[in-house]
């Protein structure tokens, strides 16, 4: 799979999940505790660099365990995994030993751009705190990016 094929395939899969995530983000924001000081939407690529990843929300502020527990019901925005029916959702998987492009950086950049588009499409959002898109372990070339500065 070429780099362009990877980006195109990944973008299609992400776009197919835009509706679900655009419904989930407002629910997540409703659960934000008053003590939260920032919301991070963090993209976690697999350590193997094979294309698996997840996107989870977490909040910053005092007593992290308690405030993150308050959003846990809607914190998982996207998760790829092996199931009995194959890879769900059907993201592109690559052999990291036979790939000549930085899969995790590309994955984080594609996912970050996707999340940003979804956020921008939700013009009615009321969020009192800054929102950041973050690539875990500093993956990605466009992250971190602030998508909301707070009210």
Image (tube, rainbow, N blue to C red):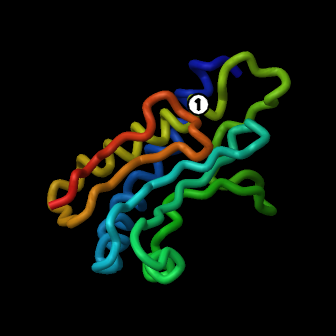
Q: Which residue lies under the disc numbered 1?
A: 105
Residue at 42% x, 75% y: name it: 62
**Label 1 SS:** helix
Q: Is residue 17 left or right of residue 122?
A: right
Q: Residue 53 versus residue 147: which sits nearer the camera?
A: 147
Query: Residue 127 at x, y = what percent?
Result: 22, 65
Label 1, residues with CA under 10 Å away: few <14, some 14-19, many ≥20 = some
Q: Quadrant of the C terminus?
A: bottom left
Residue at 28% x, 79% y: name it: 34
Q: Is residue 141 left or right of residue 36?
A: right
Q: Quick one: which residue is furthest to the right in this view?
A: 97
Whether 48 is drawn above or below 124: the answer is above
Whether 58 is drawn above or below 136: the answer is below
Whether 68 is drawn above or below 109: the answer is below
**Snapshot quadrant of residue 95:** top right
Query: Residue 97 at x, y = what percent?
Result: 85, 25
**Snapshot quadrant of residue 112:** top left
Query: Residue 35 at x, y = what percent?
Result: 32, 77
Q: How many marks?
A: 1
Q: Quadrant of the N terminus?
A: top right
């Amino acid at each position: 799979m070429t780099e362009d094929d990877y980006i195109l395939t990944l973008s299609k899969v992400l776009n197919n999940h835009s509706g679900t995530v655009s419904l989930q983000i407002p629910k997540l924001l409703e659960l934000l505790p008053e003590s939260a000081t920032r919301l991070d939407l963090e993209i976690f690529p697999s350590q193997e660099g094979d294309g698996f990843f997840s996107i989870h929300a977490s909040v910053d502020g005092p007593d992290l365990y308690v405030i993150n527990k308050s959003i846990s019901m809607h914190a998982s925005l996207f998760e790829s995994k092996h199931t009995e029916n194959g890879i769900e959702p059907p993201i592109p998987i690559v052999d990291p030993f036979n790939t000549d492009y930085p899969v995790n950086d590309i994955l984080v950049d594609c996912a970050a751009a996707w999340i940003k588009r979804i956020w921008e499409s939700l013009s009615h959002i009321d969020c009192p705190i800054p929102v950041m898109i973050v690539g875990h372990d500093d993956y990605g070339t466009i992250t971190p990016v602030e998508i909301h500065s707070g009210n």
